[in-house]
Image (tube, grey):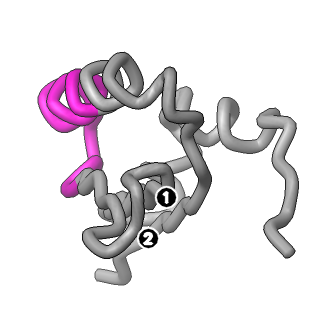
Amino acid sequence: MNQYVVWVEFGVAREHRPSFSQLVRANAVASLRNEAGFRRFDVLTSASGDGSDVALYEVYDSEAAFVSTSRAITIANLPLRRRK
């Protein structure tokens, strides 16, 4: 079976870090508990930086499992800006 991996990198403004951290970790726990085919959700921050750089690492059983989640729709509709 081929797994499907999603890797997302972004920055979080200093004033939003505490609430963001709490919310994203709660979302990770709920997603693992409630979404079929969702196997791993890691929230990573840079140890050498100021904590504003965040990466999410998500593992699904398959691309179909990812597409079946609301997360696929949410990510597709985010107003993302590329880093320079």
Q: Are marks 1 and 2 in contact (CB under 8 Å)?
A: no
Residue picked out by circle 2? 5
Residue 11 on image: x %, y %:
59, 50
Crowdedness of circle 1 by 10 Å Cα count: few (<14), some, many (20+)?
some
- Say how many tags the image has: 2
Q: Is residue 46 left or right of residue 29?
A: right
Decide which of 76, 50 is in the foreground and name it. 50
- Image quadrant occupied by the C terminus: bottom right
How far is disc 1 from disc 2 in space, using C-alphas?
Answer: 20 Å
Nearest to the eye among marks 1 and 2: give it. Answer: 1
Quadrant in the rendering for residue 54: bottom left
Task: Give the amino acid type for the residue marked by disc 1 in the picture.
Answer: Asp
Residue 44: x and y, percent?
Answer: 30, 60
**Amino acid on which the number 2 mark rests in the picture:** Val
Residue, disc 1: 53
Q: Residue at x 21, y 22 (%)?
A: 26
- Residue drawn at x 69%, y 33% is 73
Find out whether residue 16 is within the magenta segment.
Answer: no
For label 2, count other residues whose C-alpha is less than 10 Å away and answer few (under 14), some (14-19) or many (20+): some
* Predominant secondary structure, magenta span: helix
In what element is the residue under mark 2?
A: strand
Q: Which of the two residues, 36 or 52, is positioned nearer the viewer here?
A: 52
Quarter placement of the N terminus: bottom left
Q: Which residues are magenta?
A: 25-40
